[in-house]
Amino acid sequence: MGNPYLFVVGCPRSGTTLLRHILSAHPQIVITPEAHWIPLWYQERIGLTPDGFVTDILIGKLLEHQKFGLFKLGPEDLASLRADDQPVSYSRFVTSIFDLYGKARGKKLVGNKTPDSVRRMQTLHSLWPRTRFVHLIRDGRDVALSLMNWPKIRSKKPGTFPTWKEDPASTAALWWELNVRKGKETGRSLGPELYHEVFYESLVRDPETESKALCRFLGVEYDRVMLRWNELEPLPLEGSGSLRRGGKKAATGWMPITPRLRNWRSEMPSEQVERFEAVAGSLLSELGYSRSFPNVRTQAAVHSDLVRGELAGLPSDVRPYRTAYSEN
């Protein structure tokens, strides 16, 4: 089993940064910074030959990519991966990048955490058929609350969608539903040997039990140091600032595993809760989350369908699911 050893995916703002830290604290595992380009550039054939081999264009684009700088790999490192002038496939090239990242940190098993890759798991599976996927799922109302309080939301999905300004709760619900359902659908096709779900609420409530289950899935021995990740040398900074105390960057500035950093019950207006549940209430129930509005008002249901319809023209990878209500 080579690298990438695993991918951590999930709807953005679901707590994947916390899971990255927990996994990287394991003596054998390290998780790289986010890398949206891995599946996206392969799909769009950026810097690749028609047969999928790496060109100098790809290397140049990586070196210009702002987030790739967090990998701490320079021109010489990337050039060495094609030193013998033989064609190198995209999957082999990325695997070598992961190997270099792990070697520099003394870790053999290297994974990646990129939440948006939850919609591109099939592409990643086609590149690395034995790689495992860990899908982190969080109550969508807490996800929506986090999105609505995220300073970067205006430049990120779903903040760029045309319905966001008028109705962020319904838009966030559609975004959460799309990502969670897409991950679960692909996960069913992969099977339990390659796909594992972790619920954020269970992770922060009983991190030891969840970490042990995660280690069993990954085929490694559990180590209690995973629960003390905040005491270790910090990873390259990215993701949610809510894990840091007062914006500190030192290792001691990271908070330990803490339940209820967000609480939609006390922080989310009831109107927004109803709008969210009108859109994604059935998925909440499927996942075992209780609903505040088991029977939403007709007005809220009609409104949710209108929002869904407004977003129906988005590109296929971000287009919301249709529901039984919208089809009747």
Image (tube, rainbow, N blue to C red):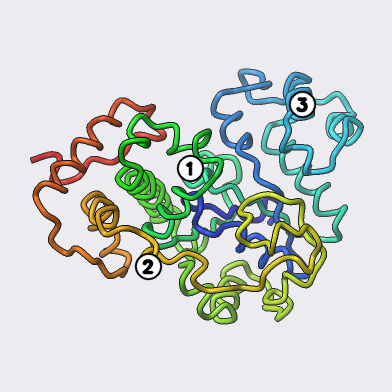
Closer to the chain start, of discs 1 and 2, is 1
Quadrant location of the N terminus?
A: bottom right
Residue plotted at (19% across, 63% down):
293
Q: Nearer the viewer, mark 1 or mark 2?
A: 2
Pick whichever, 49 or 254, lies toward us.
254
**Residue 291: image location, x then y, percent:** 25, 66
| Residue named by callout 3 | 64
Q: Is residue 198 left or right of residue 289?
A: right
Q: Name the element at disc 3.
A: helix
* Mark pair 1, 2: CA separation: 38 Å
* Snapshot quadrant of residue 229: bottom right
- Looking at the picture, which amino acid does disc 2 mark? Ser
Q: Which residue is at 69% across, 61% downward?
A: 246
- 180 left or right, relative to 207: left
Secondary structure type for disc 2: helix
The correct choice, above or below, for 295 with respect to 227 in the image is above
Q: Mark 1, mark 3: which one is toward the viewer?
A: 3
